Amino acid sequence: MFQQLDFWELLASPGLDDDLDVILSGFTKEQLKYFHGPIIQYRSGSWEFPSRLRKLVPQARIEQALHGEDGYASELEALGYISTASLEFPLSHEWANVTFWLCDRVLQKFGLLPDDEGSVADILGRETIQISRYETSEYLLPLRRWLRKNIVKNAKLSMSK
């Protein structure tokens, strides 16, 4: 089950409306579908995509497009998806590593860690959090590609504000 993202509502900001059309005119149709697509979450139970992450999805999607990573969903969306899945069943060692790595990157990037904590690695009592090439190529990147494909496929592109 997918929940359609109300791109305009989440991106609403005073004074942005006038510039938004100009800003969005530089993106491809596929990118615009990505911006407007649903938030994909693991849904066998009643768990919701984390609200603290949900409000940051538009920003993460725009940054993803600006960095030229058109085949992948953002790391933030991957973290949100794994978060909902992890509430349904235990994660394997590889998925746990990917989750901790994503947490470390996403929570720091968006300022979601408590002020007195430096990183997720610090919270977990580890020096660093790394994932292997295997975990990247077999777990993280396929998930991000799958998410992006399904977001674009299920987007209802409505450009009305």
Image (cartoon, rainbow, N blue to C red):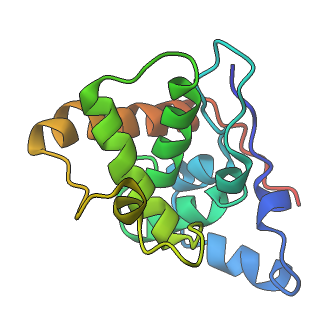
| Rendered image quadrant of residue 50 | top right
| Rendered image quadrant of residue 9 | bottom right
Outermost residue to the left: 133
Image position, residue 16 (x, y; %): 80, 82
Instruction: Pick the quarter of the image with the C terminus.
Output: bottom right
87 versus 4 height, above or below: above
Residue drawn at x 61%, y 47% as measured from the top left: 33
Q: Is residue 105 rendered to the left or right of residue 92? A: right
Image position, residue 56 (x, y; %): 65, 61
Nearest the eye: 90 or 134: 90
> Is residue 25 in view from this perspective?
yes
113 versus 103 height, above or below: below
Residue drawn at x 60%, y 70% as measured from the top left: 114
Instruction: Pick the quarter of the image with the N terminus.
Output: top right
146 versus 122 height, above or below: above
Q: Is residue 45 rendered to the left or right of residue 119? A: right
Nearest the eye: 5 or 114: 114
50 versus 91 height, above or below: below
> Is residue 71 in view from this perspective?
no
Image position, residue 49 (x, y; %): 67, 38
Nearest the eye: 114 or 84: 114
Residue drawn at x 43%, y 60% as measured from the top left: 123
Image position, residue 152 (x, y; %): 55, 38
Nearest the eye: 43 or 112: 112
Outermost residue to the top: 44
Residue drawn at x 79%, y 60% as measured from the top left: 10
The total number of labels drawn is: 0
